[in-house]
Image (cartoon, grey):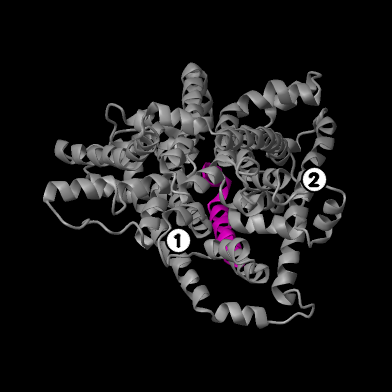
Amino acid sequence: MASLALPLPGRRAFRPSGSWIIPPAVVLGVLFFYPLALILGESFAGGKGAATLLNYAGVLGSVQFGSALWHTVTIALVATAGCLALGLVLSLILAFIPFPGSRVLARVIDTFIALPTFLMALAFTFIYGTAGILNTSLMQALHLGLPPLDFLYSQWGVILAEVTVYTPFVMRPLLAAFSLVERAEIEIASSLGAGTFRIMRQIILPAAVPALLAGGSLCLLLTTNEFGIVLFIGAKGVVTLPLLIYTKAIQEFDYTGACVLAVINVCLSLSLYSLYRTTLSWFGGRSAGLV
Amino acid sequence: MASNVLVAALPALPAGGVRARRVLIGIAIAFIALFLVLPLSVIFAQAFSLGAGAYAAALADPDVRAALLLTLGIAVIAVPLNTAFGLAASWCLARFRFRGRGAIVALIELPLSVSPVVAGLLLVSLFGRSALLGGFLESHGIRVIFAVPGMILATLFVTFPFVARELIPLAEAQGSEEEQAAITLGASGWQTFLRMSLPKLRWGLLYGVLLCNARAVGEFGAVSVVSGAVPGQTNTLPLEIQTLYDGYRVQAAFAAASLLAGLAIVTLVLKAALEWRHRDELRATRRAHIP
């Protein structure tokens, strides 16, 4: 804010208020960094007192962990890719192909953001599950003996639910970015003979890149950490890191094991978070504000 | 910013046949129908599957009632606190340039990057019975983990960024000229904030509060780690839904879920109504925003 360089008579009146944010920031620091240190300590010492790497060796070497890491990473990557693709298509349609009701539709998509994520998973089991609406109606219509669609209780069910829930997080910055595309630019390009695809490639998509990157990295972060959806879909064998931490801590009372996994999970999500922040700062404050 | 209102102002893409256009519009509508309208209707259909009497009976269950009250109570505490913090933080961050400003912004968004399960575990490590602080509080008769205070803290933690991250970019984009003018004309800091800054932030504030509330009401992971899930005592609505669902009381689970879905729909309708009532003013702020 360059305007603050002006000599301001009232500037001093503002100044003391700057300290408002310090107490909450301290609280967050205490509520986050101190317990994180406690968890880190527990993960090494494991109640035995001496710091060892044995806990880590035990956890990292287990089949459980390998499978959880694999599921976490694939689910997050595939779901994010799905969110980006679906979000891009839907935003393009809503932004550039106005039709009666398109504004209402854009507004309805906001509903997703206000719905608890696990509710979707709960409803999905009754739609796409083996005994769900879709399968029973398909079985009746096609006279099948077995449910034809059996994907819900697998990684794909989790991915489908996550794509549904997190696509709006990509659409919001995209729609905002599209609103900044100059109407005149498109009209000029069109009058100079550029077709739809050329306009898309040369005008619209470049405008969308920052939003896609920022929205995509946010999605990656949220899908990596998602818990409710995975738990409620309840697919056998599909255990992600957050779910494994929950199982260890709450059901197996293996606090040390949970701490080791939590440290690994925090490392994973913090590196994704720094990726997200870097992406934002790359494109400057303005696009950052849109996400 | 809820970008939906902007959609109407966008240029339509020139080329593209009528048929292609219809197909694309069809995709958008099909997506909304399949992934939003259908799941929501399933929730309500299942809730009423045994008739209105069973629905009323499920909601009259003392455990469900207690869960609803607890959920609302936690939201009533967490949302205003985080709103006040978000306002203070955005205002200060937009007005002052100081060392460590970037770090504070990153710290505010940090809870977004931590898995809710890990957030719960952080609280356990801090307030658990065997922890230093937790043991001290326990010996003075204050229970945090497996009790309501822990659930409030967990909700505060996970909803911490939502208001602030909506407001920070808005406050930054607004500039401070009018506030400086107000101060020069003799307004106090509070007057300036209430009369100049707040009105310009209110649409972002509305959206942030909505997101914060949705998350507070629907939070599952963090709360479930610290709650202990005692029906009637430490079960919030999401946890009660899980308890019912795991106990094969499906209709009751969906009746409780319909409360959550209803809450989400009510908040969105309120938001839409507010935006509709103030649409001219809203359009004016939007226009002022776009460079």
Residue at x-position 31% and y-position 46%: A127
**Quadrant occupied by the N terminus of chain A:** top right
In the figure, A55 relative to A20: above or below? below
Label 2 amino acid?
A: Ile
The image quarter in which residue B27 lies:
top left
Q: Is residue A86 magenta?
A: no
Residue A133: x and y, percent?
27, 45
Residue at x-position 30% and y-position 50%: A128
**Front residue of B51 and B118:** B51
Question: Which region of the structure is painted magenta?
Answer: A267-291
Return the mark for residue A258.
none
Residue B179: x and y, percent?
72, 26
Residue at x-position 76% and y-position 79%: A51
To which residue does mark 2 refer?
Answer: A22
Residue B99: x and y, percent?
77, 51
Does residue B22 appear in this view? yes
Q: Is residue B175 left or right of residue B181?
A: left
